[in-house]
Every structure is written in structure tokens, then in C-alpha cells.
Image (spheres, rainbow, N blue to C red):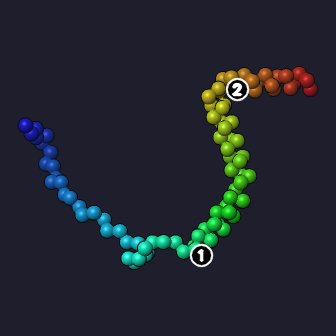
Amino acid sequence: MKINSGIDEEPLILLPPPSWSTASFGDTADTSPMELAGLREHLDLCRESYSGLFAWQCVAETMRGFMEARFITTLVVVALLIGIGSLLL
């Protein structure tokens, strides 16, 4: 049983699958040793330049997750630390 909603529906049009084009031009898409060496150099350079930044980012994400899960407790602890610090000074 087909219910007519009053809206004319377009017929379903099947499109052909996309034809992909690669830079290998029909050959195998293997990487050369020179390309792999260049990639290794690039990855080593990136790892060296961002290693410290990445470590700090991980620490910040861990602290944020800890504080989000315990927001009220974190506020109370911070307030207590500020209060104790002001009393000692």
C-alpha cells in the first residue's frame, strides 16, 4: 500500500561509481627508497621540534580531564590553598 504525501518524488537516479586517477599511471604505487628516506627525515625533524610541546600538551590535557571530573573539589582545594597561602604570608 503506497501512501501519497502530495509531494511529487523524484525518481532515484543511480550514478556510476567514481573513476579514480592516481599518479602511478597504471604502474604499481610503490614508494622509492629516496622517498622513504625523505619521509623519515621529515618525521624525525617534526618529532624533535614538537617533543617538548607534545609533552606539555599531554600534561595539560590530563590536568583538564582531572579538573573537569572533579570541578567542585578542585575549586575547594584551590580556595584552601589560596587561604592557607595568604595566612602564611
Residue 47: percent from left, percent from top: 68, 58
Is 68 on the left or on the right of 26, as rendered?
right
Q: Is residue 40 above or below residue 57?
A: below
Foreground mark, 2 or 1, reads: 1
Identified by mark 1, the residue type is Met
Residue at image coords 69%, 64%? 45
- The circle drawn on residue 63 is none
Identified by mark 2, the residue type is Thr
Residue at image coords 28%, 63%? 17
Is 11 on the left or on the right of 75, as rendered?
left
Residue ID for mark 1: 34
Q: Earlier in the sequence, mark 2 or mark 1?
A: 1
Residue at image coords 68%, 36%? 63
Residue 80: percent from left, percent from top: 78, 22
On-image quarter of the C terminus: top right
Q: Is residue 52 above or below residue 19?
A: above
Q: Is residue 23 above or below residue 18?
A: below
Is 68 on the left or on the right of 87, as rendered?
left
Mark 1 neighbour class, 10 Å CA radius: few under 14, some 14 to 19, many 20 or more = few
Residue ID for mark 2: 74
The residue at the far left in this view is 1
Q: CA distance from mark 2 to mark 1?
A: 53 Å
